[in-house]
Image (cartoon, rainbow, N blue to C red):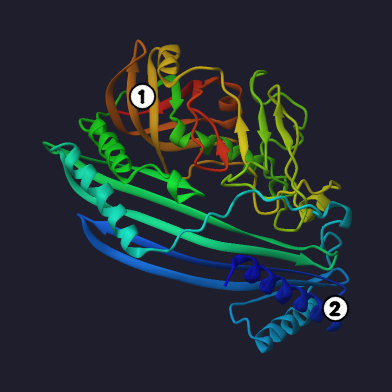
């Protein structure tokens, strides 16, 4: 069946469910439905380990009876099951407490234009091809260096899906999407020392993935470079967060400026709108309409239209991120962020990764972070780390078993430079980040 027909069929189901909800006593209703087909193939030591095929779908509905809300979901899409889900949601709504902030997004915010964002590039879900790619990646990694002695496996994933959202304000829209990825993780040994590292590639288009051989070689190279890792003495030094992990720093910023954290008064950036948070040269733009973008969408999970936004301008906190509910809690309007952010582009200072090392001089290049020691309420930051010790702008040796610590407010303000070799494999696109200083807990 053509994807257009499948999409139309799902929209018809959503439309029927919304009409039924009103008929059963709801004053407002919204429904979302997703379908996904996919394969996941993994190998270990060049033997097939797992082959999985996914064919999932489900519908979720929320109904509002006045200011009372009820929700239900079903994976059974028969007319009887859909009717039962609607009835249960309405029943639940009758027994919940009234909440003045509940309800659909304001009608004037609902998306009315749905441009083609080039998110769907279907390929035949070929398990044999997936097996070959995974094994090729592992083979390349194992052949890269005699010190690569074992593998934690390689995985190939391909997913073709669609998402439809509708509500009783009139929106009933959806789009298909595709996503492909290949990863490899290997183990290296030298004497008594064992280390592991990985590499991965992801894209909407299968033909734009890095080659399997390159993914394997990158995993092996990263692993070999970590062999001989040492502990270092406790110190306070400049730190570079390598581009592969740099987006996590802005991920903490997302959490701190999200409406849910704000109305619960659990963010260190509460009441900071318009204040200087980052250096004056730093800007962050949100661009939801990037063609084939991994976080592109013309509407959020509540049907609110997305739009180009300036998230940080000249280092100042330019906007908070609101869903409908969190916005109403704070007498603000939804910014279209139910479900997450949409392609953040962080500007850079023109430094290559080598330039950043020279700029830092002596300090720590962090390539891996571990643990969840981040407190959004206070901004306190403490995570396990591994990477490389740098002197005079040159990498000296790998380091491990250390902790880096600071406070997010100081870390944001202390960003000295951002590299121009950016990682585009997620919803935040940024280069490596040079921080003025952090505390390193070592030996």
Q: Where is 361 relative to 302, above or below?
A: above
**Displayed quadrant of residue 43:** bottom left
Q: Residue at x 16, y 36 (%)?
A: 145
- Under circle 2, the secondary element is helix
Q: Residue at x 69, y 45 (%)?
A: 258
**Residues packed near mark 1 inside 10 Å, few (<14), some (14 to 19) or many (20 plus):** some
Numbered marks: total = 2
Q: Mark 2 sits on what residue? A: 22
Q: Residue at x 48, y 60 (%)?
A: 159
Residue 284 appears at what percent x and percent y?
65, 30
Q: Where is 169 relative to 203, above or below?
A: below
Residue farthest to the bottom?
80
Q: Looking at the figure, which quarter contains the C terminus?
A: top left
- Under circle 1, the secondary element is loop
Distance (Cα) linking label 2 and label 1: 64 Å
Q: Looking at the figure, which quarter contains the N terminus?
A: bottom right
Q: Mark 1 sits on what residue? A: 234
Residue farthest to the left?
191
Residue 40 showing in the rendered view: yes
Q: Residue at x 56, y 63 (%)?
A: 161
Residue 94 showing in the rendered view: no
Q: Where is 366 relative to 77, above or below?
A: above
**Displayed quadrant of residue 49:** bottom left
Q: Nearer the viewer, residue 8 or 435?
A: 8
Residue 112 appears at what percent x and percent y?
81, 54
**Displayed quadrant of residue 371:** top left
Q: Nearer the viewer, residue 121 or 334?
A: 121
């Amino acid at each position: 069946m053509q994807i257009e027909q499948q999409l139309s069929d799902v929209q018809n189901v959503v439309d029927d469910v919304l009409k039924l909800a009103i008929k059963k006593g709801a004053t407002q209703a919204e429904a979302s439905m997703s379908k996904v087909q996919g394969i996941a193939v993994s190998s270990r030591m060049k033997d097939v380990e797992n082959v999985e095929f996914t064919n999932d779908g489900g519908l979720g509905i929320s109904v509002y009876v006045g200011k009372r809300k009820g929700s239900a979901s079903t994976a059974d899409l028969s007319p009887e099951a859909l009717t039962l889900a609607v009835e249960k949601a309405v029943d639940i709504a009758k027994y919940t407490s009234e909440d003045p902030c509940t309800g659909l997004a304001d009608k004037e915010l609902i998306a009315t234009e749905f441009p083609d964002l080039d998110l769907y590039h279907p390929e035949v879900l070929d398990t044999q091809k997936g097996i070959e790619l995974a094994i090729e990646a592992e083979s390349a990694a194992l052949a890269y260096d005699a010190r690569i002695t074992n593998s934690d496996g390689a995985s190939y994933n391909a997913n073709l899906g669609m998402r439809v959202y509708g509500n009783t304000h009139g929106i009933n829209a959806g789009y298909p999407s595709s996503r492909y990825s290949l990863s490899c993780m290997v183990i290296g040994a030298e004497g008594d020392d064992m280390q592991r590292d990985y590499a991965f590639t992801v894209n909407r288009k299968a033909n734009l993935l890095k080659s399997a051989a390159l993914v394997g070689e990158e995993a092996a190279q990263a692993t070999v470079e970590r062999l001989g890792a040492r502990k270092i003495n406790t110190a306070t030094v400049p730190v570079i967060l390598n581009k592969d992990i740099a987006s996590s720093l802005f991920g903490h910023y997302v959490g701190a400026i999200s409406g849910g954290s704000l109305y619960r008064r659990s963010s260190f950036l509460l009441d900071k709108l318009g204040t200087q948070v980052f250096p004056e040269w730093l800007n962050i733009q949100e661009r939801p309409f990037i063609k084939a973008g991994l976080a592109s969408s013309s509407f959020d999970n509540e049907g609110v239209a997305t739009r180009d936004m300036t998230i940080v301008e000249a280092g100042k906190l330019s906007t908070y991120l609101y869903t409908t509910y969190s916005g109403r809690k704070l007498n603000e309007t939804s910014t279209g962020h139910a479900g997450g952010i949409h392609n953040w582009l962080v500007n850079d200072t023109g430094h290559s990764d080598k330039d950043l090392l020279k700029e830092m001089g002596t300090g720590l290049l962090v390539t891996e972070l571990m643990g969840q020691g981040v407190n959004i309420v206070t901004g306190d930051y403490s995570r396990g780390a591994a990477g490389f010790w740098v002197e005079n702008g040159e990498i000296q040796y790998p380091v491990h078993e250390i902790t880096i610590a600071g406070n997010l407010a100081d870390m944001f303000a202390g960003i000295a430079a951002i590299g121009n070799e950016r990682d585009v494999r997620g919803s935040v696109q940024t280069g490596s980040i040079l921080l003025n200083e952090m505390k390193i807990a070592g030996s």
